[in-house]
Image: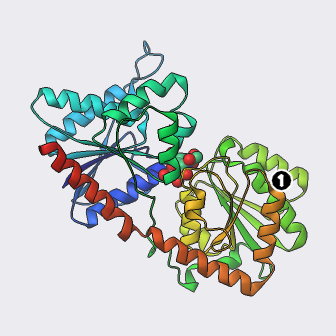
Amino acid sequence: MKIGIVCYPTFGGSGVVATELGLELSKRGHEIHFITYNQPVRLELLSNNVHYHEVNVPEYPLFHYQPYELALSSKLVDMVKLHKIEILHVHYAIPHAYAAYMAKKMLEDLGIYIPIVTTLHGTDITLVGSHPFYKTAVTFSINKSDAVTAVSQSLKKDTMRLFDIKNEISVVHNFIDLEKYAHKFSDCQRGMMAKEDEKIITHISNLRPVKRSQDVISIFYNIQKEMPAKLMLIGEGPEREQIEYRCQELGILDKVIFFGKSNEIDKILCFSDLFLLPSQTESFGLAALEAMASGVPVISSNTGGIPEVNIHGVSGFLSDVGDIGDMTKNALYILSDPERLATFKANARNTAKKYDLHTIVPQYEVIYEDTLAKCMV
Ligand code: GMT
């Protein structure tokens, strides 16, 4: 199949999932065309069946807002015609599903039929999409897609609750390349980060308020009072400065390592003992799955789709949002006993196996085939 993929090319989970999906589909023999405004961060290798087409939005001083969806829909039309793309898979409703529908209509005028698969990732529904300023257009775009998927049962439920949806929504969970996270001992440069007796706690996010990174600091503060520990913080975002100040106030700045944005998540997770994800809301929590695939147990909130990923008492523990006391108690329970820690690590890796890309990616292929077949009728 010739598949066009539209996504946000940044470090967000939706862009990561879209990129990993395209790369795996290409290995399975499909021709993939990424169409977006920058080369996706995890798209390191282009090959004869992985292509990247940049959407350019020329700056024009008359426009207060540069019209990205207009440029994207024109680019989609051009690329579908030029490369004979058979299906478009757009990740994130805003504005991708909307721009894809415009492209579809323009192509219809030329006698070309292109089906659209839309994948909802969470923030496009729970945080941004349901805002009254966007809701009408998001509802329209979802209802006009030929197939719609959501990354968790929880996100499907939220979408049905928040929007007037006429379409069927299939749940296709996020996935992980387990081989990439199957570390050899020699890969893990633990000694560079912490002393032998220090536990390594990790948090990865875009440091936005929804991630409750301040809770991460509070939990870590409590942990390091009880045992030697280091905190690895990966990611950039608006709360970074506040977090640094807070660490300074608490006198723990020397125990916190800020990595910024990183493409080497697997290497950092490799030497981690525990992962913290106390988010306010999370449609899935890809970062938690990445941690689990590396054999890192997860202390998380019990919100949104996280309970579909992190299994309470098995791969880690779940607590109510903001319950720092319970999260600290659970973290100390796992970390304080080496045998228990080893069991949780093994369980985390085993639990992640449910989301192996070899299980999940074929589910998208079936959706593409069914959608194409349905649209031929
Ligand atoms: O979490 C973010 O702020 C980034 C966001 C995105 O759109 O890339 O992540 C969302 O999509 C991910 C991939 O499907 C999910 O794993 C995240 O849980 C989801 N984030 C939220 O729902 C807050």
Q: Where 161 sits versus 51, above or below?
A: above
Q: Where is residue 299 in the image (x, y as percent from the top left)?
A: 70, 64
Q: Where is residue 46 in the image (x, y as percent from the top left)?
A: 30, 58
Q: Where is residue 38 in the image (x, y as percent from the top left)?
A: 40, 43
Q: Where 223 sits versus 163, above or below?
A: below
Q: Which of 107 and 65 is in front in this view?
A: 107
Q: Where 209 sits versus 367, above or below?
A: above
* Lateral position of residue 106 relative to residue 268, left or right: left
* Lateral position of residue 339 relative to residue 91, left or right: right
Q: Which of 179 and 149 is in front in this view?
A: 149
**Extreme-left residue of the structure:** 111
Question: In the image, what residue occupies the spot 78% across and 78% down?
Answer: 195
* Lateral position of residue 240 relative to residue 103, left or right: right
Amino acid type, residue under disc 1 in the picture: Cys
Question: In the image, what residue occupies the spot 81% across and 79% down?
Answer: 336
Q: Which of 324 and 180 is in front in this view?
A: 324
Res 137 → quadrant:
top left
Determine whether the residue tagged by mark 1 lies in a helix, strand or loop: helix
Question: In the image, what residue occupies the spot 36% across and 58% down?
Answer: 21
Is residue 41 visible in the rendered image? The answer is no
The residue to which callout 1 is attached is: 247
User: What colour scheme does the image use?
Assistant: rainbow
Q: Where 155 sits versus 263, above or below?
A: above
Image quadrant where one finds the C terminus: top left
Is residue 310 visible in the rendered image? The answer is yes
Residue behind label 1 places its C-beta within 8 angstroms of ligand 1: no
Res 360 → quadrant:
bottom left
Res 42 → quadrant:
bottom left
Q: Position of residue 147 (x, y in %)?
A: 30, 44
